[in-house]
Image (cartoon, grey):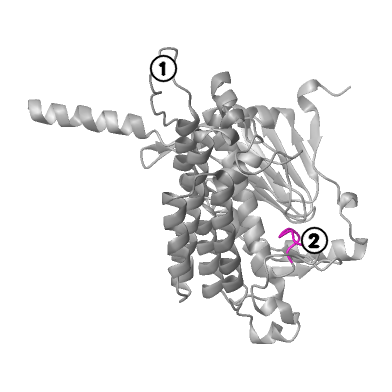
Amino acid sequence: MRSQHAATAGLPSIRRIPMTRASAREVMAATLATLPERDPASSVVVLDGDSVSMKVVNGQLLLEDGSRTARRSLQLTRAHVNGRRGGQMTPWRIVILAWHGMVTLDALAWCQALDVQVIALDPKMETVILHGAPTSSDDARLRRAQALAPDNAAGLKVTRFLLERKVRGQRDVLGRLGYQVDDVDRSCEAMAGRAETVRECLGLESVVASIYWQCWSEIACTWSERDLRHIPQHWRTAGQRTSNRGKSPRNAITPVQAMLNYAYKLLETETVIALRKVGLDPGMGVFHTDKPNRASMALDCMEAVRPMVDAYVLDLVESRVFGKGDVMELLDGTCRLLPPVSHMLSQQLPAWRAEIAPVVEHVANLLRPTDALGRPPLKRTPLTRANASRAQAEIKRRKIRAA
């Protein structure tokens, strides 16, 4: 009989993917042929290939991926994962992109004890199917204030803060592309000055979004000469944000839009983790409506950081010459990213974590209710530790003055 600690949690099987066996084999062969070398200094470990394995051996976390004949292995010790870099703790992430495999209960407990987040994406890079359980604060009053926010002044403050930051970031990206940004500046001023409802803020943001994505659609993607005649014509530009299945931007049909979708999904994952740590409900949004199986609050907070993700993808598009082995077209016309592009995007998780942390903290402080005496709440910074840094700096200044 299996022991309880030896039980395993299976990842999605290849049979769940809506494609023929032949196309699945082609995608897997291309993935295995381009697996990059791991960066030993990175705190993001990407597991990819035919089958992955996560288990604990002699107190160490043993990670294996690749193919059955060519396995890659990595051992993580508690001391290494729990160490400091640059004087600060570095949270670790394990990103699973494999088609199937197994994760033992011991491995999940090992990761939970050291706050290592385990993120698994399905083979079409759409849905997060596994999260590590982060530590979080539990404040029912904060969640109640979050639930009431769409109908009061706190919700308007949150909406203004997030959308104004998003629009200003989009303005910077448009300016970098060489476009005039006068209309965007006017929308920023209107949102900050005279927008009095959440609906009005969303209307101003939608005007900017239509201009923004129209400009993005014309961005050229550079392909190698030998592969240029093999790729579809519509892959040569970023294309429209909408997909071939209607108005939704999901199921991207161009490589650039696929990279944006994948990077947004990674950002959403970091946002969900941050929201849980500050005590907010990731699914209860302010201006994104509540829907089953959707992290509406995470989508709200993400808006402020999306332009930074866009700027990174734009850098990648402008600096890289793409080849046919970087992306594959599935039977339904959608694009599947392959290594090393998918791994390069995954390695940006620390950057997105650093960008989203102050945003989530500020949103939580805007929503935090007054105390029993009606006094304004203290601003808390559990993610960035900004309060602790300021306190230490003040103590240092006092010691210097005393000396």
Locate residue 320 relative to residue 284 in the image: left or right.
left
> Which quarter of the picture shows residue 143?
top right
* Magenta stretch, main secondary structure class: loop
Q: Residue at x 42, y 37 (%)?
A: 384
Image location of residue 354, percent across then percent down: 46, 45
Task: Mark 1: give few (<14), some (14-19) or many (20+) Cα within 10 Å.
Answer: few
Q: State the quadrant of the C terminus.
A: top left
Furthest residue in direction left, as rendered: 403
> Which quarter of the picture shows residue 220?
bottom right
- The CA span between labels 2 and 1 is 60 Å
Q: State the quadrant of the N terminus.
A: top right
Mark 2 or mark 1, earlier in chain: 2
> Which quarter of the picture shows residue 277?
top right
Determine whether 118 is above or below 330 in the image.
Answer: above
Residue bearing mark 2: 28
Residue 26 lies in magenta, yes or no?
no
Q: Residue at x 50, y 31 (%)?
A: 367
Residue bearing mark 1: 374
In the rendered structure, which amino acid carries the disc numbered 2? Answer: Met
Pick whichever, 173 or 141, lies toward us: 141
Task: Mark 2: give few (<14), some (14-19) or many (20+) Cα within 10 Å.
Answer: some
Residue range corresponding to the magenta coloring: 246-252
Residue 250 lies in magenta, yes or no?
yes
Locate residue 31 relative to residue 273 in the image: left or right.
right
Image location of residue 244, percent across then percent down: 79, 67
Q: Circle 1 — which element?
A: loop
